[in-house]
Image: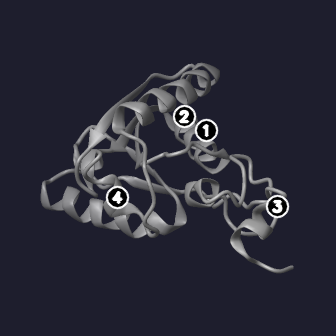
Amino acid sequence: MDVALGGTFDPVHDGHRRLFERAFELGDVTVGLTSDELAPKTRHVERRVRAFDERKAALEDELESIAADYDREFEIRRLDGPTGIATEPQFDYLVVSPETKDGGERINEIRRERGHDPLEVVVVPHLRADDGDIISSTRIVMGEIDEHGNVLEDADSETGRSE
């Protein structure tokens, strides 16, 4: 089976790792990695995103060990548009997070229009940080949590929050 998933993955965190593991459970994986042009458009909060080549190298490092654990192959391709690679006919599954589920439905509409079978959209629940909020790359970049969802001790004083 061929599995597609996409994202910016900057930085990679345990929530992403959960997506990757689920994808490799299902089959060989193709990751659409947002291009430098697309990445800022997918952010809900304006923040710096590392260059495509840097993100790709870090993602390859992450995926190699997970792929080996499942005896699967993977490929990383540049994603230039929001529906990206998943509209191509070879895929069977699309692995998404809850906030990208609607995008999966749009991808299936496009696939139907093109005469392709719809994908099975597999929604992987968010992973929660120690404080109960979701683990996200933005929270990591803002210094609130680390990649594993541990709340950073000085996060409250830096952001001006009170307990």
Identified by mark 2, the residue type is Phe
The percent coordinates of residue 153 (x first, y second) are: 84, 58
Count residues near mark 2 (Cα–Cα under 10 Å), then give few for <14, some for 14-19, many for 20+.
Answer: many
Badge number at residue 52: none
The amino acid marked with disc number 1 is Glu
Per the model, the C-alpha gap separating discs 3 and 1 is: 21 Å
Badge number at residue 24: 2
Does the rendering let one see residue 65?
A: yes
Pointer 2 with pointer 1, Cβ within 8 A: yes
Looking at the rendered structure, the kind of residue marked 4 is: Pro
Compare residues 31 and 148 and report the one nearer the observer: 148
> Which mark is first along the chain, 1 or 3?
1
Looking at the picture, which amino acid does disc 3 mark? Asp
Q: Nearer the viewer, residue 156 or 151?
A: 156
Which numbered dot is residue 21?
1
Q: Is residue 85 left or right of residue 7?
A: left
- Residue 123, position in %: x, y? 53, 59
Dividing the picture into quadrants, the one containing residue 143 is bottom right
Q: Secondary structure at mark 2?
A: helix
Q: Earlier in the sequence, mark 4 or mark 2?
A: 2
- SS label for mark 1: helix
* Sequence-earlier tag: 1 or 4: 1
Residue drawn at 67 percent across, 64 percent down: 134
Q: Which residue is mark 3?
A: 130
